[in-house]
Image: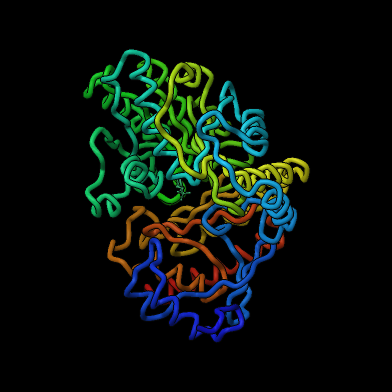
Amino acid sequence: MQPITNHMPTAELRALDAAHHMHPFTDAAALEKKGARVITRADGVRLWDSEGTEILDGMAGLWCVNIGYGRTELADAAARQMRELPYYNTFFQTTHVPAIALAARIAELAPGDLNHVFFAGSGSEANDTNLRMVRHYWAVKGKPEKTVFISRKNAYHGSSMGSASLGGMQAMHSQGGLPLPGIVHIDQPYWYGEGGDMTPAEFGLARARQLEEKILELGEDRVAAFIAEPIQGAGGVIIPPETYWPEIQRICDKYEILLVADEVICGFGRTGHWFGSQHFGIRPHIMTIAKGLSSGYQPIGGSVVCDEVAETLSHGEFYHGYTYSGHPVAAAVALENLRILEEEDILGHVNRVAAPHLAEAWASLADHPLVGEAVSVGLLGAVALTPDKATRAKFAAEPGTAGFVTRERCFANNLVMRHVGDRMVISPPLIITPGDIDLLVARARTALDEAHAILR
Ligand code: PLP
């Protein structure tokens, strides 16, 4: 077989892709019709495809390339580590310097007494760790009946059996026999879509109090933890009303429920803080991290655990771990990524420059006839598409409707933006400049205009 390279004609690459590559989260029939877009290189906030088209990446890959593409320092860190110690595990009383250094650095950055890190290869694996770790924790504390996790509908916590069960995506639960037992879901704090006549403040409280109702229904002695993303990302960038998180915190404190904050998207500067929990003043017992930890340059995730939980687990063996827990190359790359985030004051850039600029430019889309709301926090944003602004009505829920059409128009205008139902979301690299934010918003407006013409 001839070598397969970037220089091959696109049609041939697509044919090989269709023949041999099974894609995650992809409609196979649609893929077969059109073929995949072949991405060949990237730099800063831009991608190039195999036909030479330049594309603005409004999603930082999958919400992960926080420092932007093309940072050769990370490639150098990987190469150095591969030469010195390409692999060793952290099982059975062994360790290595990259895992030690990264755990110590994360403990420094994490709020409160979140001082301990259990490494995984991804966010899904880290949430599976949380599920087992929390149940084991309660068993060690003499409360083995505390096993139930409460999560939320339309949450995303990963794709493995455990993490997809923790998630609240109906479509995912419809395949593979999910959710696993002992995981229940309450409603999400999505005021625009589900708030009806309530004010956002009333609605935020009402949705938070569903947690209390669920705990009382199940019995406090059966509930192990509540897990939630500070801002739901894959659910459509659902920014909860201000009343929501303080009430959730009060309820977790009152009933002795562990609070797990899934920071896989919100972490590492996305909201302008190191962690989304800090944006809302949440005090989690465990945080899930991945994505921005390495800016996606290497697959790595983890669970950041508070002193009390770690201390409880420190007297015996937790029969759990992944071959690549704390992988030295991934850890070295993550450390370099964290160095760049800090030394280049990328959070300062988000807070002083990019987020204020995006907030204003993004909000300007609210005047578009298709847009019911245009919201952002830090460098996470969403617009809700609606056929009727006054009633906040939804488009028909069939596939191929408003969100899909708009996403296709974004693609045609060389902007990567994602749709979740009828919400269009963005999560660009944190290093984006005001000029590129203006370009992103201009392309989004063009895509909305074109979608409006089609949907009218
Ligand atoms: N948790 C959240 C909030 C996520 O957004 C994701 C991925 O999008 C995950 C967990 C799963 O992470 P991974 O895809 O690395 O397994």
Q: What's the residue at 50%, 17% (across, down)?
A: 311
| Residue 196 in sight here | no
Q: Quadrant of residue 141?
A: top left
Residue 200 locus on image (x, y percent): 41, 37
Q: Looking at the picture, tell me which residue is in the foreground, 241 or 232.
A: 232
Residue 430 locus on image (x, y percent): 65, 51
Residue 218 locus on image (x, y percent): 22, 24
Q: Is residue 260 above or below residue 234?
A: above
Q: Looking at the picture, tell me which residue is in the foreground, 317 or 383.
A: 317
Report the quarter where the C terminus lies: bottom left
Farthest right residue? Answer: 343
Q: Is residue 141 above or below residue 92?
A: above
Residue 300 locus on image (x, y percent): 55, 46
Q: Is residue 60 above or below residue 226?
A: below
Q: How is the image coloured?
A: rainbow
Q: Looking at the picture, tell me which residue is in the foreground, 395 or 173.
A: 173
Q: What's the residue at 73%, 46% (across, down)?
A: 340
Number of labelled discs?
Answer: 0
| Drawn side of residue 201 relative to residue 363, left or right | left
| Drawn side of residue 218 relative to residue 194, left or right | left
| Drawn side of residue 331 relative to residue 173, left or right | right
| Residue 22 in sight here | yes
